[in-house]
Image: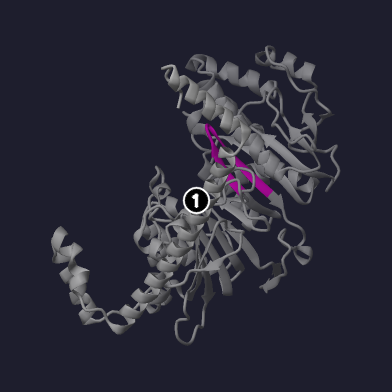
Amino acid sequence: MADTILENSLRSLIAARYLRSNGIEIGALYAPVEVPPEVTVRYLDRMSANQLKQTYPELGEYELVEVDVVDDGENLSSVLDASVDFIIANHMIEHCQNPIFAIENWLRVLKPNGILYIGVPDKRYTFDCHRSVTSLDHLIRDYTEEPLWSMHSHCSKWARLVDKYPEHEVAARTKVLTNLNYSIHFHVWTQIEFLELLLYCQNKLSFPIEIELVQKNGMEFIIILSKTAPEIEQTSRWNNGHRSIGERTVNKLKIDLGCGSRKKEGTIGIDLQAQPGVDYVLNLQIEPLPFPDKSVDYVHSSHFLEHIDTAHHVVQIFKEISRVCVDGTNLEFWTPYSWSNSAFVFGHNIFYNEDHYLHLCVWNSSFWQDQLKARWVLKEITYVIDPDILIELYSNKVKIDFALKYYKDVVREFGVFIEVNRNYQGETPPVKRTFTVERSATRYPVKSSEVGWSQIELEKALEWFSLGEVERSHYHLQQSPTEDESQSYLQQTHTELNQLQLELQKTQAELLQAQEMINAMQTSKFWKLRTAWFNIKNSIGLATDD
């Protein structure tokens, strides 16, 4: 039950991401795919709900959706060309006797840029597990010769391997299934073989499809296809200018790596898991970016790189980024800072600080330029420091640069801004360092606290640290200060003296005010009565409250 809930949840997430406007679902039966409330679905099946229950008794216990259109799901003869925005065929294509013909018809009724949602059971995890995968040659023959030639074979295998009839009853059962044109799983696949079928349709038959998503989901896998518009009209969904690649118009793309559900606005989202905002489901550690060379002009990544398994995988991802980037592409990477506690939570494998990028872009830039086929120029490093920590540093008069060098858990996260240059000439430019309280807030420069040192200063430092506690307390008294040190000390002493004088004047004024108040009280009628009462008590030997 838990697996079913999770599978349905992922189905609905994918549907919410890709399905819009009006469409049809073929063969929904008792498990229609959940779609967003603003989406309209008509249900199509080969029979009405009542007829389906009569023909397939095993459906009797389920509540079936009301069928809006009675039609053959492979032919869709009653559906007009280019009339629907999407088609859902969830656990339906395995029931098609001629899958290639079915896909062709589904594309026929889809509008340009329409979406085809196909859910396919992986035969390894179902009652089809003992059956052999349907070969591509078999599917091609079904398409070119029509599938009557294979009908008997399919029904026989079903009777033997799924219904598990004894061998002497297989022939009779096969005849029943054939005569009824019973809807069995005529074909079975795993994800690899089904993708092989789609690539054949795309490359050999020139079906107008793009594979938008391939997602494993428990015992099934989900494929999202889009119907491409005619070549002359084809434009990308991303509307930020364009460039020509061959004869096709392709935009300069902006991508977000490891975006999760928080994809940066205006970018194409790429992640390992399908969820709202994810446009491409990829394992970037082993799969290339699905974009042409020199087609991307902005790359964003937020709290993704720390999850990569090894440094080797990071380098491979960086190489892929370089491949797809145009000259001048801006990279923006955010990760936890290695000197913060949050950098070391479970699931983080690499701990980044500024040295990673200085090594890549500054210290060993020539080596990495050869590796990445481009010069990555580090423009800025930004540190995010929470307001309470910033205030505490200020209260203790600790400089930001000093805290970055020597204190732990000051920076929550940090970002780097890099420009990709393919023909970079000249010296490495200085790297700007800034800090802020939030990514989107004002950035302030980190002023360097580095100062030069001399051999004399080093010797003094070594002498200081070699002294004992008592000796160290008298150390400065024994040193002859320089003229600058003396001047600085005198100025500091003068400032402190002025402060003490101001405090003394304030205390004297407060003392004078208190004395005047006491004098005023002593001349009052109340004070005189109080004094007389104490005198009477003393004269008769009573204790006073004074």
**Viewed as shown, does residue 142 lie left or right of 283?**
right
Q: Looking at the picture, which amino acid does disc 1 mark?
A: Leu
Query: Where does the image place residue 354, in percent across and percent down from the top left?
Result: 41, 65
Q: Quadrant of residue 154?
A: top right
What segment is highlighted magenta in the picture? Answer: 213-225
Residue at the location (79% across, 16% down)? 50
**Viewed as shown, does residue 239 lie left or right of 281?**
right
Residue at the location (45% across, 85% down)? 427
Query: Where does the image place residue 440, in percent across and percent down from the top left?
Result: 61, 59
Task: Choose between 435 and 351: the one closer to the eye.
Answer: 435
**Viewed as shown, does residue 347 lie left or right of 155?**
left
In the displayed structure, 305 sits above or below 197; it is below
Residue at the location (75% across, 34% down)? 25
Give the color scheme: rainbow, by chain, secondary structure or one colour: one colour
Q: Is residue 238 magenta?
A: no
**Viewed as shown, does residue 377 lie left or right of 482?**
right
Query: Where does the image place residue 476, in percent across and percent down from the top left?
Result: 22, 70
In the displayed structure, 265 sits above or below 184; it is below
Task: Choose between 43 and 78: the one closer to the eye.
Answer: 43
**Which residue in the protein does label 1 denote?**
511
Q: Label 1 neighbourhood size at 10 Å, few (<14), some (14-19), many (20+)?
A: few
> Is the C terminus in the top left, top right, bottom left or bottom right quadrant?
top left
Q: Quadrant of residue 371?
A: bottom left
Q: Quadrant of residue 428?
A: bottom left
> Is the N terminus in the top left, top right, bottom left or bottom right quadrant?
top right
